[in-house]
Image: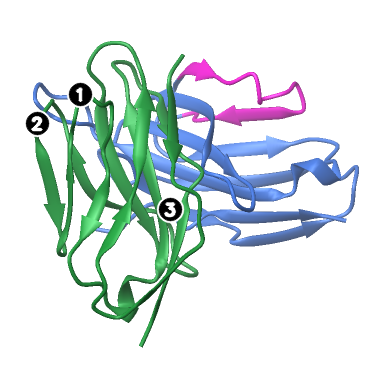
Amino acid sequence: DTGVSQDPRHKITKRGQNVTFRCDPISEHNRLYWYRQTLGQGPEFLTYFQNEAQLEKSRLLSDRFSAERPKGSFSTLEIQRTEQGDSAMYLCASSPPFRQGATGELFFGEGSRLTVL
Amino acid sequence: GNSVTQMEGPVTLSEEAFLTINCTYTATGYPSLFWYVQYPGEGLQLLLKATKADDKGSNKGFEATYRKETTSFHLEKGSVQVSDSAVYFCALRKAGNQFYFGTGTSLTVIP
């Protein structure tokens, strides 16, 4: 069983460019999350999908950010008109269907590091 | 609101020393509590968890007890190894699907 995979692992872009990150969750995990992590901070919640439905979005997710999970499998996170403040590690995590007694822990990918020059 | 407060680092210990990393939380109801670990160059991995008061989570020699009366979930290990050098994150999960993470505590173990 493979873990959560993210692509690309590193992205360097110029301010104003658009970038897209992809996340492939663990198979059969119906829940998928995007987090952002900056240096010295813990992961901050961005958005959450259950199957293909985007159920929660953080205030951190400005209108330049959009996430999709079109078939309930992989997900993409796009950042338009990038700014230097967008430089961070973007983490994807997945979680299996909720069952009574389960704790619903997250399984993280290794992250996609974005540097905006 | 929901939040997690972690002991600030960095923490540097000699091999075989005792480790405590403090974590307290603010939440209504009964959250599940977690410790995640991030080794250099790797993603976050679940270290241990507890789902209700007085539960003790344990893994790889690490332990943490869910203390509702003190709203704490302190991480302990009796004898740390160089391979334990990593960043440790305390987290809570409320009913619903959001996790709230602390800021992380960096641990360096020197031989």
| CA distance for labels 3 and 2 | 31 Å
Residues marked 1 and 2 touching at CB (< 8 Å): yes
Label 2 SS: loop
Q: Amino acid at mark 2?
A: Asp
Q: Amino acid at mark 3?
A: Gly
Chain B: drawing colour:
green
Which one is nearer the viewer's eye here, A23 or A73? A23
The residue lying at 25 percent from left, 26 percent from top is B70
Q: Amino acid at mark 1?
A: Lys
Chain A: drawing colour:
blue
Residue B11 to residue B34: above or below: below
Q: Tell me the residue that label 2 is attached to.
A: B54
Q: Tell me the residue that label 3 is attached to.
A: A109
Chain letter of the residue carrying label 1: B
Chain letter of the residue carrying label 2: B
Q: Which residues are magenta?
A: A54-70
Q: Tell me the residue that label 1 is attached to.
A: B68
Measured from the top left, where is residue B38 in percent x and y? 41, 59
The residue lying at 36 percent from left, 42 percent from top is B90
Residues marked 3 and 2 touching at CB (< 8 Å): no
Task: Say whether residue A60 is left or right of residue B90.
Answer: right
Task: Say whether residue A95 is left or right of residue A14.
Answer: left
Query: Few, some or many C-alpha atoms within 10 Å of disc 3 (few <14, some 14-19, many ≥20)?
Result: many
Which one is nearer the viewer's eye here, A25 or B54? B54
